[in-house]
Amino acid sequence: MNGRIVIPGAGGMVGRVLAGQARAQGRDVVALTRSEWDITDALAAARFIEAGDVVINCAGYTKVDAAEAEPERVAAVNTTGPETIARACARAGADFIHISTDYVFSGDFSAVPGGGPRPYDIDDATGPLSVYGRTKLAGEFAVLAAMPDAHIVRTAWVYQGRDGTDFVAVMRRAALGDGVVEVVADQIGSPTYAEDLCTALLQIADGAIRQPLLHAANDGAVSRFEQARAVFAELGADPSRVRPVGSDEHPRPAPRPPYSALSARRSAEAGLTPLRGWREALCAALSVA
């Protein structure tokens, strides 16, 4: 087991879960919220990083729609901030793991041989559609330019499923209520349980995996509509209360890729344990009170 696990962005969902898992495993954890470590402060990283640390960056600007209105702020958090951490880790002799997103992909398979969509591999062509996706992709390039032996971990549709605003939590509250819920049926991805993502991050932190770019998402591809119906079914609510609609009926400021499921094939070849299927993970999440 390596040295300390240092977590910027520890106040967010993934950061909280990661800190809890790491402590439960007996690791030495330094968990820092945004007020304690603002990653846009160019001088801050050096105050927290020591030789032998594993820094897992859970800080990020993740409000996909709001990002369209403030691209400079988003770039500072999603691109420049991670680059600054990478440089500080390289100087200090620490390892660095940075979380990225399925939204670096476009979902456009029109030019792909065979024509149909299939889960994205790590070396597939990117093509982000939104400010959020573009700044996250730029962050990947910036981190690896500053520290080639860093790890970039792309994940997708992360949820914890209890309190909060993640999709599963929202659908859980809807299932316990009444009435019809409209959910888009033309966005397909890989829903990922935060607990499973953090298990993968800690495996990477142990240092045996050398591949710099990895995918860590629960296995399978499902639409938001199908995911919502699964939440209702698991909770004993009537899935027919969930009605499919097109994205054009619920327009959002930021475009989403119509398909962004992630393949674990190349990551498994590199030694990362594949995450379980999305439905099994959802059942586990909903079983937690």
Image (cartoon, rainbow, N blue to C red):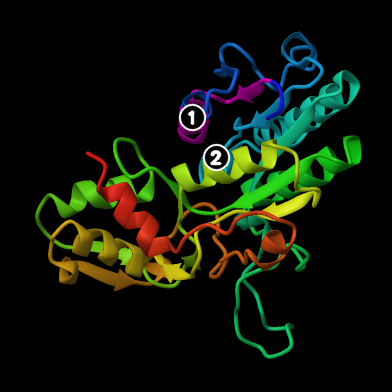
Which residue is the site of mark 2? 62
Q: Quadrant of residue 140?
A: top right
Location of the N terminus (image quadrant): top right
> Looking at the picture, how far across and down is residue 48, in whole percent?
72, 12
Among the two numbered marks 2 and 1 on one chain, the one whose residue lies closer to the N terminus:
1
Q: Is residue 227 left or right of residue 139?
A: left
Work out whether residue 103 or residue 161 is closer to the camera in this orientation and state it.
Answer: 161
> Looking at the picture, how far across and down is residue 19, in whole percent?
51, 26
Residues rendered magenta in the picture: 4-20
Q: Amino acid at mark 1?
A: Gly
Q: Residue furthest top?
A: 47
Which residue is the site of mark 1? 12
Circle 2 crowding by C-alpha within 10 Å: few under 14, some 14–19, many from 20? some
Q: Secondary structure at mark 2?
A: loop
Circle 1 crowding by C-alpha within 10 Å: few under 14, some 14–19, many from 20? some
Q: Residue furthest bottom?
A: 114
Is any atom of residue 64 visible in this view? Answer: no
Q: Is residue 108 left or right of residue 212?
A: left
Numbered-mark total: 2
Q: Is residue 206 left or right of residue 282?
A: right
> Does residue 55 sit above or below 272 in this rendering?
above
> Does residue 251 sit above or below 94 in this rendering?
below
Location of the C terminus (image quadrant): top left
